[in-house]
Image (spheres, rainbow, N blue to C red):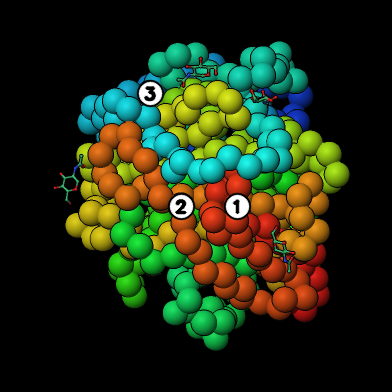
Amino acid sequence: MLFSSPISLLEIFVFAFPAISQAASAASQVSFDQFLATVTAADFQRWQHTAVNSESSFSQMKAHILDMYSGVGSVSHSFVLDDRYFDCIDKEKQPSLGGRPLASPPSAESDEPPSQPGGPTEPKTSTTSPLTQNLKDSFGNFISCPDGTIPFARLTLEKITAYPTLAGFFAKSTNGAGHASSSRGLEELQDRGPSAEPHLYAFSYQQVTNYGGHSFLNLWDPVGDFSLSQQWYVGGSGSNIQTVEGGWIVYPQHFSKRPVLFIFWTPDDYSTGCYNLECKGFVQINNNWTLGAPFTQFSVAGGTQRGFDLQWKLFQNNWWLYLRNTNASYDTIGYYPTSLYNGGQLTKNAEVIEYGGEVTRFTTTDVWPQMGSGMFPSKGYSQAAYQNTIYYNPNNQSGGVGVWASLFKDVIGSNACWDINITESAQGGGWGTYFFFGGPGGKTC
Ligand SMILES: *[C@@H]1O[C@H](CO)[C@@H](O)[C@H](O)[C@H]1NC(C)=O
Ligand SMILES: *[C@@H]1O[C@H](CO)[C@@H](O)[C@H](O)[C@H]1NC(C)=O
Ligand SMILES: *[C@@H]1O[C@H](CO)[C@@H](O)[C@H](O)[C@H]1NC(C)=O
Ligand SMILES: *[C@@H]1O[C@H](CO)[C@@H](O)[C@H](O)[C@H]1NC(C)=O
């Protein structure tokens, strides 16, 4: 059983188990210690009405949560954003580190964009991270984390039992559908389990040796089960496909009805890997940004266009993530150690860059989501969604200068639902290489 939104799930728990509800809309705040005590005491009887498919799956979910939190120590500050709890945990004790020391970021920042003959550029306004806006939640807690800690989206049984298994919770999709490729046709994408619908795309790609890359992602809040705009850095082939990914996603069952910042990785063509900090993988060092937290400011049709710069860079055995508000300097968010990739291609470099939109739906009766802003690329600036200043990083040195991407387009699904229109850097003016993408989705895609 799949819930179409976290609200329905929360409502069911509030109704059925008021005493153990973790819903943030409950009258009193659930402290980190109370939360952990509840998980420790949880038994299958109380959770069998969720989507979880068996007692052993439930045990794995519970064990995962307790394992993730086993070394984090005490938590002195928590806050609620969009009905979800976030705990500020000691940076040095985060689950992904497992006691190892933090890596030092490259001395120079992320790579600079290639030089580009000027030309007028449309204005772009950043979307500010909710953590740097001086906001308070409904309990009066500041929506921010003190220095030395990182914001960690509380990993609850409510969240994980919305899926039949722990692996289902981690997965971006089943059967390797989390990234599109020109060699992976629609037939292959549809060849999957009985309930899973295919992932469909309007995207762009280039085969080139790279150490990450950059784009500015224009931010919208489309409606649907699962709709995103992102970057992929991909290496390997077959069951050894490995990725580093990031962007924004609307995915109510997992995160929020509003777009959230996300990252994802897989070392084995989507058999394992996970989003954000939901399994041991990404090491976060920055307290300005929250993975999995909804943005509060979006683009407006015909009005202000918002978004953020995102960059991945492989440097000294770590894939570093950078984010930036317009006109600010980059924040270094953290890294995936290449040890996660088991000696595979992404321990050396990526072989393909991809940028674009991806959607799926969870039942055959749901409509296909909007992609981007819900408008076709032909509507252009301030109506259609875009990514611009798209370049890849050609070396693994600190600093450095990117190379404009030279992209091919691919649309998987019906052109009546979404499309992508790429402009190469030679014609791109101050935007460099860019594209508009998206569309309304619909019943038949
Ligand atoms: C960014 O800088 C440009 C040029 O200095 C300015 O016009 C624009 O308003 C700034 N944008 C923001 C969001 O501060
Ligand atoms: C860059 O890549 C080369 C070749 O794979 C490797 O020998 C070198 O150690 C890497 N340098 C850094 C800074 O990661
Ligand atoms: C957070 O953002 C502020 C304001 O932009 C900046 O001064 C500070 O260095 C950032 N902190 C980190 C850890 O990046
Ligand atoms: C694609 O984008 C270019 C540049 O913005 C524009 O001139 C062209 O009309 C667009 N084509 C379509 C089919 O939307």
Q: Which mark is residue 428?
A: 1
Q: CA distance from mark 2 to mark 1?
A: 10 Å
Mark 2 Cα-neighbour bin, 10 Å: few <14, some 14–19, many ≥20: many
For residue 275, side relative to residue 226 (left or right): left
Residue 254 visible to an observer of this rendering: no
Q: Residue at x 54, y 64 (%)?
A: 204
Residue that label 2 marks: 404
Mark 1 Cα-neighbour bin, 10 Å: few <14, some 14–19, many ≥20: many
Residue that label 3 marks: 91
Q: CA distance from mark 3 to mark 2?
A: 35 Å
For residue 285, side relative to residue 445 (left or right): left
Q: Residue at x 66, y 64 (%)?
A: 421
Q: Position of residue 112 (x, y in %)?
A: 42, 36
Q: Residue at x 58, y 29 (%)?
A: 325
Q: Are marks 2 and 1 in contact (CB under 8 Å)?
A: yes
On screen, residue 29 above or below 17: above
Q: Amino acid at mark 1?
A: Gly
Image quadrant in which the N terminus is located: bottom right
Q: Earlier in the sequence, mark 3 or mark 1?
A: 3
